[in-house]
């Protein structure tokens, strides 16, 4: 960035110097032209007042005075006298300044002289006898003046360039310093010293930085939790298997150890499946196969599939409501309902109940899972959707919970742009409500 700013400033300074020099030369040349015209007009007036014939001009005009060339031209264009050249010259009636003098009394032009081989200024005036007195001066004199001043101009240009280079470096450092300071202090929340125009950009960068750090911390915690959760059942399986292998346990104990190994393996498989599913839901490339579906039908099917498990735990289950159409991924929605109902059974009390309700309210589809379980303490309600967070860890291990069910629910809710609410009271139960977008059908 510094190099780019310096390069732009250097090019700007160089272009400015060149443009200034060209403009200065043009102005100087124009001023010089006006001065030369004034001098030649004065000289012509003086000579015309002294004499109007060739002999008189020869007597009154001394060669090379003021570097001027004097020419007397007859009415028909014949050159009668020229102070720089002797001998006959071609007819000058076609010269621009001569024609203007004949018609207007005076004329002016600048052109290349084939006779003298250089660029010339010409001024002509008509005399009383209609002859033309012409004064000319070589234009090379203006360039000789410019050539003499060129070293001084070059020196000034070099000095200006060096000064501008120093200033550009100072300005660049001043411009970039707040940005460098922000980069070195990215964790700061203040905006002091930052350009007003960059404040939204800085705030966005800092938010992104905070999100990255937060995600990095979550991934680190997730890795640690996964390692711990996987290690626990693997350690149990390995221990029981080792005891069986050594043959130091009896047949009755072998059966019990085999049961524990099976339960640990089952928990391990459940945990691995939940981790894989959560990783899929975390992926940016996840595609939702959205279609119109009946939320009530999916809820009813889920309740029926879990009814046997609920009976084994002494839990009564029922599904209430009516057909309610939403647009979503059927597999994901069924997974969401299953996880909510599974949690409601897992953390319920003996002789408890789980009630699943589906209905339309205010143009939105509502899925509600209510249980009469142990409830969630107020301090834990915000964290129950975190990965591996368990309100009662010992109960989760006994019932085979992985602590990932509600994390999966949260991701599915987010993928469907839905809203989830949780109400709970310790010892009374928990109510989880999911609000989907405007229903596409169902009962009015």
Image (tube, rainbow, N blue to C red):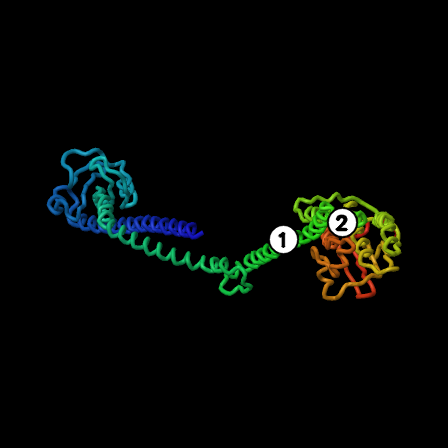
Residue at image coords 17%, 49%: 66
What residue is rendered at 76% in x and 44% in y? 290
Compare residues 188 and 89 and report the one nearer the observer: 188
Q: Tell me the distance, in whole angstroms, between the alpha carbons under discs 1 and 2.
A: 42 Å
**Which residue is drawn at the image coordinates 21% and 33% (left, top)?**
90
Location of mark 1 (residue)? 219
Residue 414 can be seen in this image: no
Image coordinates for residue 275, horizontal then vertical, percent: 70, 49
Residue 412 visible in this rendered orientation of the protein? yes
Q: Is residue 270 left or right of residue 302?
A: left
Q: Position of residue 93 (x, y in %)?
A: 25, 36
Q: What SS does tag 2 mark? A: loop
Q: Earlier in the sequence, mark 1 or mark 2?
A: 1
Kindly identify which residue carries mark 2: 249
Q: Which residue is farthest left?
A: 59
Q: Nearer the viewer, residue 14 or 187?
A: 187
Asked if disc 1 and disc 2 are in contact, CB closer than 8 Å, the reply is no
Secondary structure under the numbered disc 1 in the rendered image: helix
In the picture provided, is 372 more to the left or to the right than 59? Answer: right
Vertical placement of residue 185 versus 285, above or below: below
Q: Is residue 266 left or right of residue 311?
A: left
Give x and y (percent) for residue 188. Answer: 54, 63
Residue 116 locus on image (x, y percent): 20, 37
Front residue of 311 and 298 = 311
């Amino acid at each position: 960035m510094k190099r780019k700013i310096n390069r732009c400033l250097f090019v700007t300074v160089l272009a400015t110097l060149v443009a200034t020099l060209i403009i200065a030369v043009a102005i100087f040349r124009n001023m010089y032209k006006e001065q030369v015209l004034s001098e030649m007009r004065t000289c012509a007036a003086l000579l015309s007042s002294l004499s109007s014939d060739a002999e008189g001009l020869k007597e009154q005009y001394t060669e090379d005075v003021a570097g001027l060339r004097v020419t007397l031209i007859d009415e028909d264009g014949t050159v009668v006298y020229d102070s720089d050249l002797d001998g006959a010259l071609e007819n000058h009636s076609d010269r621009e300044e001569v024609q203007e003098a004949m018609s207007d009394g005076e004329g002016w032009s600048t052109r290349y002289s084939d006779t003298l081989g250089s660029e010339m200024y010409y001024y002509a005036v008509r005399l009383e006898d209609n002859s033309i007195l012409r004064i000319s001066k070589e234009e090379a004199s203006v360039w000789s003046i410019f050539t003499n001043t060129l070293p001084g101009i070059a020196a000034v240009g070099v000095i200006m360039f060096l000064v501008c280079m120093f200033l550009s470096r100072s300005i660049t450092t001043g411009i970039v310093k707040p940005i460098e300071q922000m980069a070195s202090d990215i964790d700061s929340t203040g905006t002091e010293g930052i350009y007003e125009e960059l404040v939204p950009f800085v705030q966005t960068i800092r938010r992104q930085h905070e999100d990255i750090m937060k995600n990095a911390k979550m991934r680190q915690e997730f890795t640690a939790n996964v390692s711990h959760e996987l290690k626990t059942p693997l350690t149990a399986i390995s221990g029981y298997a080792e005891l069986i292998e050594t043959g130091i346990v009896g047949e009755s104990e072998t059966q019990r150890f085999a049961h524990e190994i099976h339960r640990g393996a089952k928990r391990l498989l459940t945990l691995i499946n939940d981790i894989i599913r959560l990783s899929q839901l975390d992926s940016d490339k996840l595609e939702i196969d959205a279609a119109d579906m009946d939320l009530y039908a999916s809820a009813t099917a889920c309740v029926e599939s879990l009814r046997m498990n609920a009976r084994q735990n002494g839990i009564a289950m029922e599904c209430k409501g009516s057909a309610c159409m939403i647009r979503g991924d059927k597999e994901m929605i069924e997974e969401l309902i299953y996880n909510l109902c599974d949690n409601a059974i897992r953390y319920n009390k003996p002789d408890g109940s789980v009630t699943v309700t589906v209905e339309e309210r205010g143009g939105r589809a509502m899925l509600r899972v209510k249980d009469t379980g142990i409830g969630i303490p107020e301090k834990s309600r915000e964290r129950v959707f975190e990965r591996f967070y368990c309100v009662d860890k010992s109960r989760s291990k006994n019932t085979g919970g992985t602590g990932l069910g509600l994390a999966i629910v949260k991701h599915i809710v987010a993928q469907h742009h839905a809203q989830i609410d949780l109400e709970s009271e310790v010892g009374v139960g928990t109510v989880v409500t999911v609000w989907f977008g405007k229903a596409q059908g169902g009962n009015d």
